[in-house]
Image: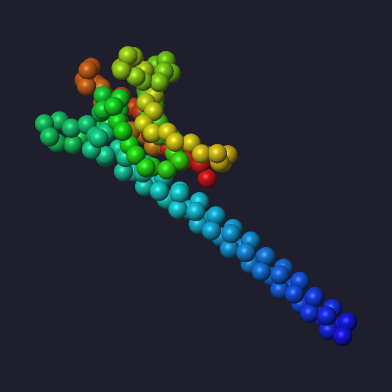
Amino acid sequence: MQETILVIFIITIIIALGLFAFYKYNLNSIEKFKLEYEQLRAYTLLSTLPNHPQLQNSYLGNPENSIDTSKLLSLNLNSLGNKEIIIKQVYPKIEDKLCSLNNYPNCSSYLIYKKESSEKNINIISTPVSLYFPLTKEYRTGLLEIKWNY
């Protein structure tokens, strides 16, 4: 009788360890899938955001391949997840200031969207963009940077 109880107890422990290992494996694969999904969303956003109608510069109704910096001051993007999107002017180099209505166009970075989470791991991707300044009618080089937490 004691041997039967001991065998059932050992088998129960082995089954419980197997279920725990299976649970951890599934949890890790879900986290990996989540990271790949968030990375895919960030790359998609990075490639489509410069062509967004609220950002794109146009001349006589024809869209141009640049971002209108005057539109960046009043931009309102929603539901992009836990990301931070910044456009920085790279060339010509000027003093590093966050742009607002008071200091435009003598600033170098535009905060487009910001929603942070408590996660500590941060991924950063960026791409060069062309910035158009309608007040001075000149083009400058910028960097579109997306930071997301996972």
Let me know if residue 150 appears in the view. Answer: yes
Give the residue displayed 49% in from the left and 53% down from the top.
34
Q: Is residue 52 left or right of residue 7?
A: left
For the image shown, how many numbered marks are present on the structure?
0
x%, y% of residue 127? 39, 37
Side (left or right) of 5 relative to 50:
right
Q: Position of residue 6 (x, y in %)?
A: 84, 78
Tell me residue 97's x, y (percent): 41, 18
Q: Residue at x 23, y 17 (%)?
A: 136
- The colour scheme used to paint the residues is rainbow
Residue 110 position within the rendered picture, expressed as x and y whole percent measured from the top left: 37, 26
Q: Single out the residue that lies furthest toward the right.
A: 2
Q: Residue at x 51, y 39 (%)?
A: 117
- Residue 124 visible to the viewer: no
Where is residue 49, by image quadrant? top left
**Quarter of image, res 68:** top left
Task: Report the quarter where the N terminus lies.
Answer: bottom right
Report the residue at 11% width, 31% height from top: 60
Asked if 94 appears above or below 10 in the picture, the reply is above
In the image as oriented, which residue stretches furthest toward the front?
Answer: 1
For this view, does 106 lie left or right of residue 134?
right
Query: Viewer-proximal residue, 132 or 1?
Result: 1
